[in-house]
Image (tube, grey):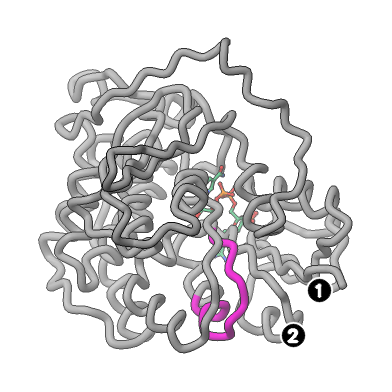
Amino acid sequence: MKKRVALLGATGSIGRQAIEIVEAHPDLALCAVTSGSTPLDDIDAPLKQVGGDLEGILDESRPDVVLNAVVGFAGIHATLWALEHGVDLALANKESLVAAGELALAAQRRGGGRILPVDSEHSALFQCLEGRAPEQVDSLVLTGSGGPFRGRTRDELTEVTTEEALAHPTWRMGPKITIDSATLANKGLELIEAHFLFGIPYDRIEIVLQPTSIVHSLVRFRDGAALAHLGYPDMRVPISHALTYPERAATPLAPLDLTSLTLVFEPPDLETFPMLRLAREAGEKGGSYPCVFNAANEAAVAAFLEGRLRFLDIAEVVADALARADGAPARDVEDLLEVDRAARAIPVA
Ligand SMILES: NC(=O)c1ccc[n+]([C@@H]2O[C@H](COP(=O)([O-])OP(=O)(O)OC[C@H]3O[C@@H](n4cnc5c(N)ncnc54)[C@H](OP(=O)(O)O)[C@@H]3O)[C@@H](O)[C@H]2O)c1
Protein backbone atom coordinates (compact mmCIF):
# COMPACT_ATOMS: atom_id res chain seq x y z
CA MET A 1 0.00 0.00 0.00
CA LYS A 2 1.31 3.41 -0.93
CA LYS A 3 1.52 6.12 1.72
CA ARG A 4 -1.10 8.74 0.92
CA VAL A 5 0.30 12.27 1.07
CA ALA A 6 -1.93 15.36 1.30
CA LEU A 7 0.28 18.21 0.12
CA LEU A 8 -0.97 21.61 1.24
CA GLY A 9 0.83 24.52 -0.41
CA ALA A 10 1.82 22.39 -3.41
CA THR A 11 2.75 25.38 -5.58
CA GLY A 12 5.30 26.84 -3.15
CA SER A 13 9.01 26.28 -2.69
CA ILE A 14 8.52 23.36 -0.27
CA GLY A 15 5.51 22.11 -2.23
CA ARG A 16 7.41 21.79 -5.53
CA GLN A 17 10.32 20.00 -3.88
CA ALA A 18 7.89 17.68 -2.10
CA ILE A 19 6.35 16.71 -5.44
CA GLU A 20 9.82 15.77 -6.67
CA ILE A 21 10.31 13.54 -3.62
CA VAL A 22 6.89 11.89 -3.97
CA GLU A 23 7.39 11.26 -7.71
CA ALA A 24 10.79 9.66 -7.08
CA HIS A 25 9.50 7.30 -4.38
CA PRO A 26 7.42 4.28 -5.45
CA ASP A 27 5.73 3.97 -2.03
CA LEU A 28 4.45 7.55 -1.88
CA ALA A 29 1.36 8.90 -3.68
CA LEU A 30 -0.33 12.29 -3.62
CA CYS A 31 -3.95 11.98 -2.48
CA ALA A 32 -4.65 15.72 -2.47
CA VAL A 33 -2.92 18.98 -3.39
CA THR A 34 -3.87 22.56 -2.58
CA SER A 35 -2.71 26.11 -3.23
CA GLY A 36 -3.85 29.56 -2.16
CA SER A 37 -4.59 30.96 -5.62
CA THR A 38 -2.13 29.43 -8.15
CA PRO A 39 -3.74 26.93 -10.59
CA LEU A 40 -2.81 23.28 -10.01
CA ASP A 41 -3.24 22.09 -13.62
CA ASP A 42 0.33 20.81 -13.94
CA ILE A 43 0.10 18.60 -10.83
CA ASP A 44 -1.30 15.07 -11.04
CA ALA A 45 -3.41 14.24 -7.97
CA PRO A 46 -6.89 12.79 -7.42
CA LEU A 47 -8.10 15.79 -5.41
CA LYS A 48 -7.11 19.40 -6.02
CA GLN A 49 -8.23 22.61 -4.42
CA VAL A 50 -7.30 26.23 -5.00
CA GLY A 51 -8.14 28.39 -1.97
CA GLY A 52 -10.93 27.51 0.42
CA ASP A 53 -11.16 25.43 3.55
CA LEU A 54 -8.33 22.92 4.03
CA GLU A 55 -10.17 20.69 6.52
CA GLY A 56 -12.74 19.63 3.93
CA ILE A 57 -10.19 18.28 1.48
CA LEU A 58 -8.33 16.54 4.32
CA ASP A 59 -11.56 14.81 5.43
CA GLU A 60 -12.22 13.74 1.88
CA SER A 61 -8.72 12.58 0.93
CA ARG A 62 -8.00 10.39 4.02
CA PRO A 63 -4.22 10.98 4.06
CA ASP A 64 -1.63 8.93 5.94
CA VAL A 65 0.51 12.04 6.18
CA VAL A 66 -0.32 15.74 5.81
CA LEU A 67 2.57 17.84 4.53
CA ASN A 68 1.63 21.32 5.67
CA ALA A 69 3.65 23.58 3.37
CA VAL A 70 1.24 26.51 3.47
CA VAL A 71 2.92 29.78 4.39
CA GLY A 72 1.80 31.62 7.53
CA PHE A 73 -1.06 31.39 10.00
CA ALA A 74 -3.33 30.22 7.15
CA GLY A 75 -1.95 26.73 7.86
CA ILE A 76 -3.42 26.60 11.37
CA HIS A 77 -6.53 24.51 10.67
CA ALA A 78 -4.58 21.88 8.74
CA THR A 79 -2.06 21.47 11.56
CA LEU A 80 -4.83 21.09 14.13
CA TRP A 81 -6.77 18.72 11.84
CA ALA A 82 -3.81 16.33 11.54
CA LEU A 83 -3.03 16.40 15.27
CA GLU A 84 -6.70 15.85 16.25
CA HIS A 85 -7.14 13.04 13.73
CA GLY A 86 -4.00 11.17 14.73
CA VAL A 87 -2.55 11.60 11.23
CA ASP A 88 1.20 12.14 10.77
CA LEU A 89 1.95 15.84 10.29
CA ALA A 90 5.01 16.66 8.19
CA LEU A 91 5.35 20.22 9.38
CA ALA A 92 6.93 22.92 7.26
CA ASN A 93 4.34 25.51 8.35
CA LYS A 94 6.13 26.54 11.55
CA GLU A 95 3.81 29.53 12.02
CA SER A 96 0.89 27.27 12.98
CA LEU A 97 2.81 25.52 15.77
CA VAL A 98 4.25 28.82 17.02
CA ALA A 99 0.82 30.47 17.08
CA ALA A 100 -1.19 27.54 18.42
CA GLY A 101 1.48 26.34 20.88
CA GLU A 102 -0.27 24.72 23.84
CA LEU A 103 -3.51 24.34 21.84
CA ALA A 104 -1.64 22.30 19.25
CA LEU A 105 -0.02 20.14 21.92
CA ALA A 106 -3.44 19.55 23.52
CA ALA A 107 -4.83 18.51 20.11
CA GLN A 108 -1.88 16.16 19.73
CA ARG A 109 -2.51 14.60 23.15
CA ARG A 110 -6.18 14.04 22.26
CA GLY A 111 -5.65 12.77 18.73
CA GLY A 112 -2.17 11.26 18.89
CA GLY A 113 -0.95 12.86 15.66
CA ARG A 114 2.82 12.63 15.29
CA ILE A 115 4.80 15.72 14.21
CA LEU A 116 7.63 15.04 11.75
CA PRO A 117 9.52 18.31 11.35
CA VAL A 118 10.36 19.54 7.85
CA ASP A 119 12.20 22.68 8.93
CA SER A 120 15.80 21.60 8.37
CA GLU A 121 16.99 22.61 11.86
CA HIS A 122 14.15 20.76 13.59
CA SER A 123 14.55 17.74 11.37
CA ALA A 124 18.21 17.76 12.44
CA LEU A 125 17.31 18.05 16.13
CA PHE A 126 14.64 15.34 15.78
CA GLN A 127 17.25 12.99 14.31
CA CYS A 128 19.92 13.83 16.92
CA LEU A 129 17.39 13.34 19.74
CA GLU A 130 15.85 10.15 18.43
CA GLY A 131 15.96 7.30 20.94
CA ARG A 132 17.48 9.38 23.76
CA ALA A 133 15.84 9.81 27.14
CA PRO A 134 14.93 13.47 27.90
CA GLU A 135 17.09 13.52 31.05
CA GLN A 136 20.19 12.85 28.92
CA VAL A 137 19.69 16.10 26.99
CA ASP A 138 21.50 19.19 28.22
CA SER A 139 20.51 21.74 25.58
CA LEU A 140 19.65 22.34 21.93
CA VAL A 141 21.69 24.48 19.56
CA LEU A 142 19.72 25.89 16.63
CA THR A 143 21.95 27.07 13.82
CA GLY A 144 21.18 29.77 11.27
CA SER A 145 22.97 31.29 8.31
CA GLY A 146 22.43 34.85 9.56
CA GLY A 147 20.74 35.79 6.29
CA PRO A 148 21.89 38.32 3.67
CA PHE A 149 22.60 41.09 6.21
CA ARG A 150 24.84 39.20 8.63
CA GLY A 151 27.70 41.46 9.76
CA ARG A 152 25.91 44.71 8.96
CA THR A 153 25.12 47.46 11.48
CA ARG A 154 21.68 49.02 12.00
CA ASP A 155 22.84 52.16 10.17
CA GLU A 156 23.64 50.02 7.15
CA LEU A 157 20.13 48.55 7.15
CA THR A 158 18.06 51.76 7.13
CA GLU A 159 17.62 51.86 3.36
CA VAL A 160 17.79 48.19 2.29
CA THR A 161 15.46 47.21 -0.54
CA THR A 162 13.16 44.21 -0.87
CA GLU A 163 15.49 42.86 -3.59
CA GLU A 164 18.46 42.92 -1.22
CA ALA A 165 16.44 41.31 1.57
CA LEU A 166 15.21 38.60 -0.83
CA ALA A 167 18.77 37.60 -1.84
CA HIS A 168 19.39 34.82 0.69
CA PRO A 169 22.97 33.52 0.69
CA THR A 170 22.31 29.79 1.13
CA TRP A 171 18.62 28.86 0.73
CA ARG A 172 16.10 29.40 -2.13
CA MET A 173 12.72 29.80 -0.45
CA GLY A 174 9.37 31.58 -0.68
CA PRO A 175 9.37 35.38 -0.11
CA LYS A 176 7.93 35.44 3.41
CA ILE A 177 10.45 33.07 4.99
CA THR A 178 13.26 34.76 3.05
CA ILE A 179 12.43 38.12 4.65
CA ASP A 180 12.08 36.37 8.01
CA SER A 181 15.60 35.04 7.47
CA ALA A 182 16.90 38.54 6.77
CA THR A 183 15.39 39.96 10.01
CA LEU A 184 16.20 36.76 11.97
CA ALA A 185 12.47 36.49 12.78
CA ASN A 186 12.72 33.06 11.17
CA LYS A 187 15.23 31.95 13.78
CA GLY A 188 12.92 33.41 16.42
CA LEU A 189 9.97 31.41 15.07
CA GLU A 190 12.22 28.35 15.00
CA LEU A 191 13.20 28.90 18.63
CA ILE A 192 9.53 28.80 19.66
CA GLU A 193 8.88 25.89 17.29
CA ALA A 194 11.75 23.93 18.91
CA HIS A 195 10.37 24.63 22.38
CA PHE A 196 6.97 23.18 21.48
CA LEU A 197 8.31 20.30 19.39
CA PHE A 198 10.85 19.02 21.89
CA GLY A 199 9.56 20.33 25.24
CA ILE A 200 12.85 22.03 26.10
CA PRO A 201 12.76 25.31 28.10
CA TYR A 202 13.90 28.44 26.29
CA ASP A 203 16.97 28.94 28.47
CA ARG A 204 18.27 25.61 27.17
CA ILE A 205 17.92 26.51 23.49
CA GLU A 206 20.84 28.45 22.07
CA ILE A 207 21.05 30.15 18.67
CA VAL A 208 24.38 30.16 16.83
CA LEU A 209 25.15 31.37 13.32
CA GLN A 210 26.92 29.07 10.87
CA PRO A 211 26.97 31.08 7.66
CA THR A 212 27.23 28.29 5.08
CA SER A 213 24.24 26.31 6.48
CA ILE A 214 26.10 23.00 6.58
CA VAL A 215 25.54 22.27 10.27
CA HIS A 216 21.76 22.11 10.59
CA SER A 217 21.64 22.01 14.40
CA LEU A 218 23.10 20.18 17.39
CA VAL A 219 22.06 18.54 20.63
CA ARG A 220 24.30 18.79 23.67
CA PHE A 221 24.07 15.86 26.08
CA ARG A 222 24.76 15.80 29.82
CA ASP A 223 27.99 13.82 29.40
CA GLY A 224 29.57 16.63 27.35
CA ALA A 225 28.97 15.07 23.93
CA ALA A 226 27.32 17.17 21.21
CA LEU A 227 25.66 15.47 18.23
CA ALA A 228 25.37 17.56 15.08
CA HIS A 229 23.48 17.02 11.83
CA LEU A 230 25.41 18.03 8.69
CA GLY A 231 24.43 18.27 5.06
CA TYR A 232 24.26 20.61 2.10
CA PRO A 233 21.42 23.14 2.36
CA ASP A 234 18.75 21.29 0.38
CA MET A 235 15.18 21.00 1.64
CA ARG A 236 14.61 17.75 -0.24
CA VAL A 237 16.50 15.97 2.56
CA PRO A 238 14.22 16.96 5.48
CA ILE A 239 11.12 16.69 3.25
CA SER A 240 12.13 13.16 2.28
CA HIS A 241 12.97 12.29 5.88
CA ALA A 242 9.51 13.40 7.07
CA LEU A 243 7.58 11.73 4.24
CA THR A 244 9.41 8.42 4.38
CA TYR A 245 10.03 8.30 8.15
CA PRO A 246 11.43 6.04 9.57
CA GLU A 247 12.72 4.55 6.31
CA ARG A 248 15.22 7.33 5.36
CA ALA A 249 14.79 6.83 1.61
CA ALA A 250 17.54 7.59 -0.91
CA THR A 251 17.66 11.08 -2.47
CA PRO A 252 19.66 12.19 -5.54
CA LEU A 253 21.95 14.40 -3.44
CA ALA A 254 25.73 14.28 -3.57
CA PRO A 255 27.42 13.10 -0.36
CA LEU A 256 28.98 15.79 1.79
CA ASP A 257 32.55 16.55 0.72
CA LEU A 258 34.08 17.23 4.13
CA THR A 259 37.55 18.23 2.97
CA SER A 260 36.06 21.13 0.98
CA LEU A 261 34.45 22.65 4.09
CA THR A 262 35.54 25.19 6.70
CA LEU A 263 32.99 25.53 9.48
CA VAL A 264 32.80 28.88 11.29
CA PHE A 265 30.34 29.69 14.09
CA GLU A 266 29.43 33.07 15.58
CA PRO A 267 26.83 34.51 17.95
CA PRO A 268 23.84 36.39 16.48
CA ASP A 269 23.85 40.20 16.78
CA LEU A 270 20.73 40.95 18.84
CA GLU A 271 21.24 44.73 18.63
CA THR A 272 21.01 44.80 14.86
CA PHE A 273 18.43 42.01 14.66
CA PRO A 274 15.98 42.59 17.54
CA MET A 275 13.41 40.11 16.16
CA LEU A 276 15.33 37.26 17.72
CA ARG A 277 15.20 38.91 21.15
CA LEU A 278 11.48 39.73 20.70
CA ALA A 279 10.71 36.13 19.77
CA ARG A 280 12.56 34.80 22.79
CA GLU A 281 10.70 37.21 25.09
CA ALA A 282 7.35 36.29 23.50
CA GLY A 283 8.13 32.59 23.89
CA GLU A 284 9.25 32.94 27.51
CA LYS A 285 6.17 34.98 28.43
CA GLY A 286 4.03 32.29 26.81
CA GLY A 287 0.23 32.56 26.61
CA SER A 288 -0.78 34.08 23.29
CA TYR A 289 2.37 36.20 22.95
CA PRO A 290 3.91 33.84 20.35
CA CYS A 291 0.70 34.15 18.29
CA VAL A 292 0.95 37.95 18.50
CA PHE A 293 4.62 37.85 17.50
CA ASN A 294 3.77 35.71 14.48
CA ALA A 295 0.72 37.72 13.36
CA ALA A 296 2.40 41.12 13.66
CA ASN A 297 5.44 39.77 11.83
CA GLU A 298 3.28 38.43 8.98
CA ALA A 299 1.53 41.79 8.63
CA ALA A 300 4.81 43.71 8.76
CA VAL A 301 6.57 41.43 6.26
CA ALA A 302 3.64 41.75 3.83
CA ALA A 303 3.85 45.54 4.16
CA PHE A 304 7.63 45.47 3.61
CA LEU A 305 7.23 43.30 0.49
CA GLU A 306 4.65 45.77 -0.84
CA GLY A 307 7.01 48.70 -0.22
CA ARG A 308 4.85 50.18 2.56
CA LEU A 309 7.30 49.61 5.41
CA ARG A 310 11.05 49.94 5.84
CA PHE A 311 13.15 46.95 6.82
CA LEU A 312 14.02 48.13 10.33
CA ASP A 313 10.38 49.03 11.01
CA ILE A 314 9.36 45.35 10.85
CA ALA A 315 10.75 44.88 14.38
CA GLU A 316 9.13 48.15 15.53
CA VAL A 317 5.71 46.93 14.41
CA VAL A 318 6.18 43.60 16.17
CA ALA A 319 7.47 45.21 19.39
CA ASP A 320 4.47 47.54 19.34
CA ALA A 321 1.99 44.68 18.86
CA LEU A 322 3.57 42.70 21.71
CA ALA A 323 3.47 45.75 23.99
CA ARG A 324 -0.24 46.27 23.31
CA ALA A 325 -1.28 42.63 23.71
CA ASP A 326 -2.40 41.18 27.05
CA GLY A 327 -0.98 37.77 26.14
CA ALA A 328 -3.86 35.86 27.72
CA PRO A 329 -3.72 32.20 26.69
CA ALA A 330 -6.16 31.23 23.92
CA ARG A 331 -8.76 28.80 25.30
CA ASP A 332 -9.76 27.54 21.87
CA VAL A 333 -9.21 28.15 18.16
CA GLU A 334 -11.76 30.97 18.04
CA ASP A 335 -9.76 32.80 20.74
CA LEU A 336 -6.60 32.24 18.76
CA LEU A 337 -8.13 33.56 15.54
CA GLU A 338 -9.16 36.68 17.45
CA VAL A 339 -5.65 37.20 18.87
CA ASP A 340 -4.21 36.78 15.38
CA ARG A 341 -6.71 39.21 13.87
CA ALA A 342 -6.15 41.86 16.55
CA ALA A 343 -2.35 41.69 16.24
CA ARG A 344 -2.59 42.20 12.46
CA ALA A 345 -4.97 45.11 12.81
CA ILE A 346 -2.19 47.34 14.12
CA PRO A 347 -1.43 49.90 11.39
CA VAL A 348 1.86 49.20 9.68
CA ALA A 349 2.11 52.18 7.36
N1 LIG B 1 11.07 27.27 1.47
C1 LIG B 1 11.86 26.69 2.35
O1 LIG B 1 12.99 26.30 2.03
C2 LIG B 1 11.39 26.48 3.77
C3 LIG B 1 12.26 25.95 4.72
C4 LIG B 1 11.80 25.70 6.01
C5 LIG B 1 10.49 25.98 6.34
N2 LIG B 1 9.66 26.52 5.41
C6 LIG B 1 8.28 26.83 5.79
O2 LIG B 1 7.41 26.19 4.87
C7 LIG B 1 6.24 26.98 4.67
C8 LIG B 1 6.10 27.25 3.17
O3 LIG B 1 7.22 28.01 2.75
P1 LIG B 1 7.54 28.25 1.21
O4 LIG B 1 8.86 28.91 1.17
O5 LIG B 1 7.32 26.98 0.45
O6 LIG B 1 6.40 29.32 0.84
P2 LIG B 1 5.88 29.72 -0.62
O7 LIG B 1 6.87 29.37 -1.66
O8 LIG B 1 5.44 31.13 -0.50
O9 LIG B 1 4.61 28.78 -0.82
C9 LIG B 1 3.49 28.89 0.01
C10 LIG B 1 2.40 27.93 -0.40
O10 LIG B 1 1.25 28.18 0.43
C11 LIG B 1 0.13 28.49 -0.41
N3 LIG B 1 -0.71 29.49 0.28
C12 LIG B 1 -0.40 30.80 0.47
N4 LIG B 1 -1.40 31.40 1.15
C13 LIG B 1 -2.34 30.45 1.37
C14 LIG B 1 -3.61 30.46 2.01
N5 LIG B 1 -4.12 31.57 2.58
N6 LIG B 1 -4.31 29.29 2.07
C15 LIG B 1 -3.82 28.17 1.52
N7 LIG B 1 -2.63 28.10 0.89
C16 LIG B 1 -1.90 29.23 0.82
C17 LIG B 1 0.74 29.04 -1.68
O11 LIG B 1 -0.20 28.99 -2.75
P3 LIG B 1 -0.12 30.07 -3.97
O12 LIG B 1 0.96 29.57 -4.87
O13 LIG B 1 -1.45 29.99 -4.58
O14 LIG B 1 0.21 31.39 -3.34
C18 LIG B 1 1.94 28.12 -1.85
O15 LIG B 1 1.52 26.89 -2.38
C19 LIG B 1 6.44 28.25 5.50
O16 LIG B 1 5.80 28.10 6.73
C20 LIG B 1 7.93 28.31 5.71
O17 LIG B 1 8.29 28.98 6.88
C21 LIG B 1 10.08 26.77 4.14
Residue 154 sits in which quadrant? top left
Residue 68 sits in which quadrant? bottom right
Which residue does the image show at 80% across and 71% down from the upper left?
31
Is residue 258 in sight in this rendering?
yes
Q: Position of residue 252 (x, y in %)?
A: 78, 35
Quadrant housing the N terminus: bottom right
Amino acid at dot 2:
Glu
Amino acid at dot 1:
Leu
Q: Nearer the viewer, residue 107 or 95?
A: 107
Judge whether 253 appears above or below 279 on screen.
above
Name the residue tied to disc 2.
Answer: 60
Is residue 176 in sight in this rendering?
no
Residue 228, which numbered label? none
Left or right: residue 10 versus residue 121 is right
Residue 295 counted in the magenta span: no
* Label 2: element kind: helix
Judge whether 26 appears above or below 51 on screen.
above
Which residue does the image show at 52% across and 26% down from the upper left?
170
How far apart are the two marked residues, 1 and 2, measured between alpha carbons? Answer: 9 Å
Judge whether 262 appears above or below 333 on screen.
above
Q: Which residues are magenta?
A: 80-91
Q: Position of residue 225 (x, y in %)?
A: 34, 38
Which residue does the image show at 75% across and 40% down from the upper left?
251
Ligand 1 has an atom within 8 Å of the beta carbon of the residue at disc 1: no
Q: Nearer the viewer, residue 105 or 69?
A: 105
Give neighbour class at mark 1: few <14, some 14-19, many 20+ (Cα, 10 Å).
Answer: some
Residue 47, which numbered label? 1
